Amino acid sequence: MIPRPVTITGGRLVVPHGAPQPGAIRLVEGRIAALGNVSPEPDDCVIDAAGHLIAPGLVDLGVFAVDKPAFHFGGITRAALMPDQGPPLDHPARVRFAALSGKPDMWIHPLAAATRGLEGVELAELALMRDAGARAVATGRRWIDDSGVMLRLLSYCAMLGLVVVTHAEDAGVAGTAVATAGEMATRLGLPSAPAAAEALAVARDIALAELSGAQLHFRQVTTARALDLVRAAKARGIRVTAGVTPAHFMLSDLELANFRTFSRMSPPLRQDADRRAVVDAIADGTIDVIASGHDPRGPEDKRLPFADAEPGMAGAETLLPLTLTLVRDGRIDLARAFDLVAGAPARLLRVDAGVLRIGAEADIAVVDPHRPWVVSSDKMAASAGNTPFDRRPVEGRVTALFKGGMQIGQK
Amino acid sequence: MQPSNTTPVSQGREYPAGGLAFPHRDLTGIGQLARHEILYLLDEAEQWFALNRQSQKRAGLLSGLTIINAFFENSTRTLLSFEIAGKRLGADVVNMHAATSSVKKGETLIDTAITLNAMRADAIVIRHASSGAVRLIAGKVDCPVLNAGDGQHEHPTQGLLDALSIRHALHLPPGSDLNGLNVTICGDILHSRVARSNILSLTALGANVRVCAPPALMPAEIEAMGVSVFHDFDAALKGANVVMMLRLQQERMQGQFIPSPREYRHLYGLTLDRLARAEPDALVMHPGPMNRGIEIDSQVADHPARSLITHQVECGVAIRMACLDVLTRRTRGVPGWAALTGEAA
């Protein structure tokens, strides 16, 4: 079905640099046909943005479940699916299936499992999975602790032109930890590991990325020392990028009080000094990507003693409003906010999206950046309400969403 | 025999009147208690300590009440101590062992808790291998919950009984705190809920607490709990009035944390020679069960004048009787103990 052309008028266009520009955008045959000073053609479906932002649809780099209602609520039009599925995305057929699982109104970009069964031992069929639709390779929730395997993986992916997305926690130091070593973990008696577990992993993987020439993306960097390493590596021209989720720039391990399992994350929440370092790293460009890490978990996974509960949060709905808190605090501007949640992840995944550009896919979010609402764990669009931001007032809400020029939720 | 629903003995001392003396439904940890609430429980235990030394040990206070001891982790001493405490107060005591329960069949902790609740227990005593498990259950049931040890978090009755034992050994009257006393806790602090509850109760009562362990068994930033940190046992013993040894789990002595039991004994075993480095009349404690010849030598453990170890066990029953009495007063309608409103934890 070829949709009617759409013109969204009276908005403010989020452009790659600088302040939003008043203007309109015209979507024809699934692509952006014109933007700026545009008037609707006679047969267009015309939508009044009412002064709100016209922004690229969000590209969420690293989700654990395909959860369309939550993605659409959050303005996410594309999501990179982590290979940690049951069974893992370590086979071309499963990758192909996953790549089609969101269409037409949500595009899922599978991340191929780096190793068979995500065991960190044998390389998976990465070229076959690439050609079946995998947009990058990921080590999953785990770090590959064998440095030889990691080096071979990176060299191979450098040849294939695939970005490697890795989890950064030294497995030996992290052990069975569920919290960051410090006063909170000590008082609660929770198994904990020093925050340096992250820097150790990041240091090794930067060295291996340099050796192999691969492009390496740390899905989450959450500590000051690891961020220093990433910053220095970038300055030396090594192809590394870093991501984070709002949990690690909004929250610290104080959230673990009363053993709240919705605050159980992987990596675990850090002490407040590290949280502030994450905010600084977003502001200075060391962190390239903010992702939701969307991982909806029901009571069977969360209503358990803290250390027995699964990590993860349902984050798709709160990704944009929590990122906008950084704009409101003056740490980044709007253009950069949308680069963190759309532009940069699209570039890493090598998809033609994440930015308003003539000819690009018409994935568009109309956003009222000041609309207030309250996050409520029991009223989420997600398949489970495991958010550590329950009852938190936030600002910023998607008012209309287009995938490939089609408005979502409109027949 | 004590008639039921009498006015509690502590009333009239400097505690808030009636139920205000202990405004909690559950006892999940020492961390939830104020100093005067700890003292209140210690003082309440004195009457039961005295009763337990009589030939007729039965009080009918909790007659008709059902107490479930739900132990998801193996225990002999603590379970027995709670069972005796409940029975001496006249309650019907039922023990649930995880090894023979549906927990092994995959039932979740919450479902087990809801089941116990539906059986209309008047108090549930819980031991579980995961930190925070007791608080989780407490949030799902309608009756008072007592923590008998949750993972590496807390073991509050142990913290209370140790304080009571010290008070007895020093011949301190009811109402006394432990101000200025130097207490050294040595052993596997990292994995010890006994250590955490004792740190909280002893520091709240004014003692100076030192913790001593090799770095691998010392939790991060424990100084924030108001203790001083030692790795050298001899230094930690200097000036100590009380030496509390912790049990080292065998599996932690096989190279993961400690090279060997004999190496542990070499550095941290409490021998008579080592005890001489503490104050001349220093008291020795151990929560049991002991690894004799490893963390503590028999001459020390069995020292008639210095060892409090059997007295700790005796105080344990009294403390648990006090806790069961105090926590069920609201259910029993004891005058002055009106139902809690608002946050009951």
Image (cartoon, coloured by chain):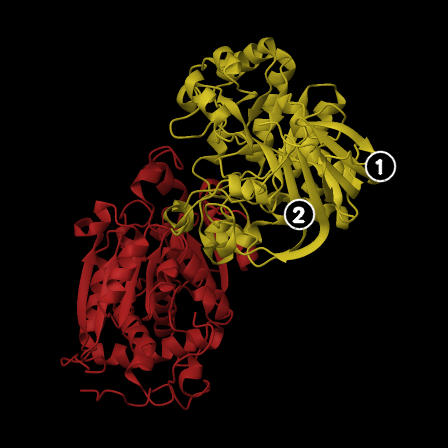
Looking at the rendered image, the quarter that the N terminus of chain B falls into is bottom left
Q: Name the residue type under label 2.
A: Thr
In the picture provided, is A46 more to the left or to the right than B172? right
Answer with mark 2 or mark 1, whichever residue precedes in sequence. Answer: 1
Of A272 and B30, nearer the camera is A272
Residue B28 rendering spot, x and y as whole percentages: 39, 64
Say which mark, if any, is on residue A18: 1
Residue at the left extreme, as displayed? B55
Residue A228 rendering spot, x and y as whole percentages: 70, 32
The letter of the red chain is B
Of A302 and B252, nearer the camera is A302
SS state under label 2: strand
In the picture provided, is A33 more to the left or to the right than A133? right
Residue at the top extreme, as displayed? A159
Q: In the figure, B177 relative to B248: above or below?
A: below
Palette colour of chain A: yellow
Looking at the rendered image, the quarter that the C terminus of chain B falls into is bottom left
Q: Label 2 belongs to which residue?
A: A399
**Callout 1: residue from which chain?**
A
Q: In the figure, A257 relative to A104: above or below?
A: below
